[in-house]
């Protein structure tokens, strides 16, 4: 009887553990951060350094540095707009609210705030470099000072 009880408890525990892991990606798969862009709760999409590198090869977006104070740019940057003043500079952004806009800052925090604000203003295709310039540099890529 004790063995059955222990087996029952073990089985139920195993089910809870397995169900908690469900939906976390393929088991033994090759999923990478570069392939995992998802719309955030803030209405923008986080992208990885690898994704941004690919996008820069055939650049078809407005690339905006929102970090303050200025600490450098990633090559190909189109604009520098302070994250907390993005609403005041909409005239510098594409008039088409469906146009692709990629934001970045030093760590990703300021650009996520700017991304949320743009999404609230109706922009539908806003992306944020996850980890910002820190992640870019950690990948061995240069910053223009």
Image (cartoon, helix red, strand yellow):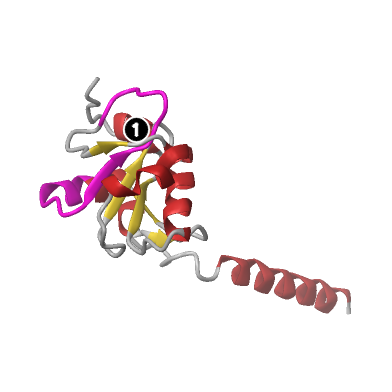
Choose between 77 and 9: the one closer to the eye: 77
Q: Is residue 70 magenta?
A: yes
In the image, taking residue 99 as reference, residue 67 lies left or right, namely: right
Residue 8, horizontal then vertical, whole percent:
78, 77
Q: Is residue 32 visible?
A: no
Magenta extent: 53-73
**Residue sitting at x 37%, y 61%:** 123
Q: Would you name the residue on which mark 1 appears?
A: 133
Q: Is residue 112 above or below residue 16?
A: above
20 lies left or right of 56 = right
89 up-or-down from 123: above or below: above
Q: Is residue 136 left or right of residue 115?
A: left
Residue that protrudes farthest toward the top in the picture: 145
Question: Quarter of the image containing the N terminus?
Answer: bottom right
* Residue 12 image-quadrant placement: bottom right
Residue 104 is situated, as x and y percent measured from the top left of the image, at 35, 40
Q: In terms of depth relative to the viewer, which is nearer, 138 or 39?
A: 39
68 in magenta: yes
Quadrant for residue 94, please give it.
bottom left
For image coordinates 49% across by 45% down, the residue present is 113
Vertical arrangement, residue 28 with respect to residue 138, above or below: below
Residue 111 location (% of width, % of height): 42, 42
Name the residue: 37% across, 37% down.
66
Which quadrant holds the C terminus? top left
- SS for callout 1: helix
Q: Position of residue 95 (x, y in %)?
A: 26, 58
Residue closer to the observer: 2 or 65: 65
């Amino acid at each position: 009887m004790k063995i059955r009880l222990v087996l029952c408890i073990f089985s139920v525990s195993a089910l809870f553990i397995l169900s908690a892991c469900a939906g976390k990606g393929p088991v033994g798969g090759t999923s990478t951060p570069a392939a995992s862009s998802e719309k955030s709760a803030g209405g923008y999409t986080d992208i990885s350094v690898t994704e941004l590198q690919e996008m820069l090869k055939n650049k078809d977006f407005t690339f905006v540095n929102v970090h303050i104070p200025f600490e450098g740019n990633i090559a190909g940057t189109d604009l520098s707009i302070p994250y907390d003043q993005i609403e005041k500079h909409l005239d510098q952004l594409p008039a088409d609210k469906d146009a692709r806009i990629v934001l970045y800052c030093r760590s990703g925090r300021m650009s996520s705030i700017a991304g949320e604000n743009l999404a609230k203003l109706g922009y539908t295709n806003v992306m944020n470099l996850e980890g910002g310039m820190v992640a870019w540099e950690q990948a061995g890529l240069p910053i223009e000072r």
